[in-house]
Amino acid sequence: MKLKNIYQGKVVSLSVLDLVLPNGVRSKVEVVGHPGGAAVLPVFPNGDILLLRQYRACLKRYIWEIPAGRLEKGEAPRQAVLRELQEETGFKARSIKKILSVWTTPGFCQEVIHLFVAKGLTLGNCLREQDEIIETHRFSAQKIKQMLKSGKIQDSKTLVALLFYFRNL
Amino acid sequence: MKLKNIYQGKVVSLSVLDLVLPNGVRSKVEVVGHPGGAAVLPVFPNGDILLLRQYRACLKRYIWEIPAGRLEKGEAPRQAVLRELQEETGFKARSIKKILSVWTTPGFCQEVIHLFVAKGLTLGNCLREQDEIIETHRFSAQKIKQMLKSGKIQDSKTLVALLFYFRNL
């Protein structure tokens, strides 16, 4: 396997792998490298859920998301969600529980996002970075279900976390 | 807004945007460009579901997925899912129904995937590309629910399609 590094950025890197696949075919594969991330569904004692209305420059629009962020070097996913939850919303959580790990776009990117549910929320101070444009909104479970049914929530990690939380399996 | 093109590949492109955010902050944003894609959950008359066991070179492993692919130039999402379904599984579908459109990783990539459910399946010939390593597996709804609960399905588009299909909203 040969590796050609194209770009090393702040968030992502890009490489082209020249490799032999398990079926013997030689192929060049573009790979967007990513350190992995963690995301958290914050749930209040009455079942209300906290969502973010976040501006995504990449899409030139605001979308609904749960708090999330990249893992810092050496940081465990549980530490990352507690940190991102407080940075983005001001809330600390007394309990976090892992639900799933998700490949966001495995055709060309190595990103995995570890998903958690947070409970026992207490409000502290936000520590948002200046390029983060985020509003927090608290919704009833009923309202969230309406938003899911009507297609208003479109972010993949947020959809997986909410649909798994409300699952019927 | 200034745009610096870093790379134009077979699957993805990479640019750095130099822009002013809605809050007035100037920021450089890495953007992975993508033409968008479409994916489809194939459902048989008895409720069985078809999944792919697909090798992802980017992750160096096999994962469970639904049939999916990039939109070709000028191609509508409905056309793309019918094409990809047949190419990857051999099945034609008499009925496809849109469920959701999903941003897979909106922090740094413009990819949107349009999700459909396909019914009325009839088997024809596969037309896989030589760098696609895919097996098709037919499972009962009960087995799929077990796979979801136990974390065996980890691809985001597949999770959203299945969890939305089995939703309790």
Image (tube, coloured by chain):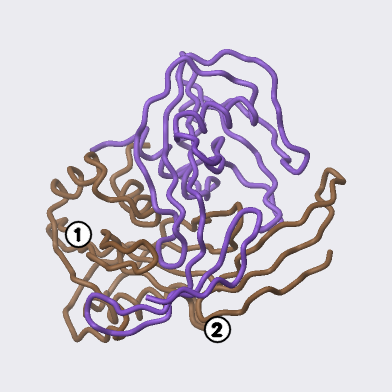
Chain colours: A brown, B purple
- The reply, left or right, for residue B108 in relation to residue B54 is left
Q: Chain of mark 2?
A: A
Residue B14 x, y percent position in the rendering: 55, 67
Residue located 59% across and 20% down the image: B91
Residue B75 x, y percent position in the rendering: 50, 35
Q: Chain of mark 1?
A: A
Badge 2 element: loop
**Circle 1: residue type:** Ile
How many marks the image carries: the answer is 2
Q: Nearer the viewer, residue B99 or A45?
A: B99
Q: Residue furthest front?
A: B2
Q: Nearer the viewer, residue A117 or B163?
A: B163
Badge 1 element: strand
User: Is residue B155 shown above or below A127?
Assistant: above
The dot on residue A74 is 2
Quadrant in which the C terminus of chain B is drawn: top left
User: Is residue A161 shown above or below A38?
Assistant: above
Q: Which image quadrant is residue B133 in?
A: top right
User: Is residue B128 shown above or below A141?
Assistant: above
Quadrant in which the N terminus of chain B is drawn: bottom left
Q: CA distance from mark 1 to mark 2?
A: 30 Å
Residue B166 x, y percent position in the rendering: 36, 33
- The reply, left or right, for residue B7 in relation to residue B39 is right
The dot on residue A49 is 1
Q: Nearer the viewer, residue B160 or A130?
A: A130
The dot on residue B9 is none
Q: Residues within 10 Å of mark 1 (few under 14, many from 20)?
A: many
**Circle 2: residue type:** Gly
Q: Nearer the viewer, residue B39 or A68?
A: B39
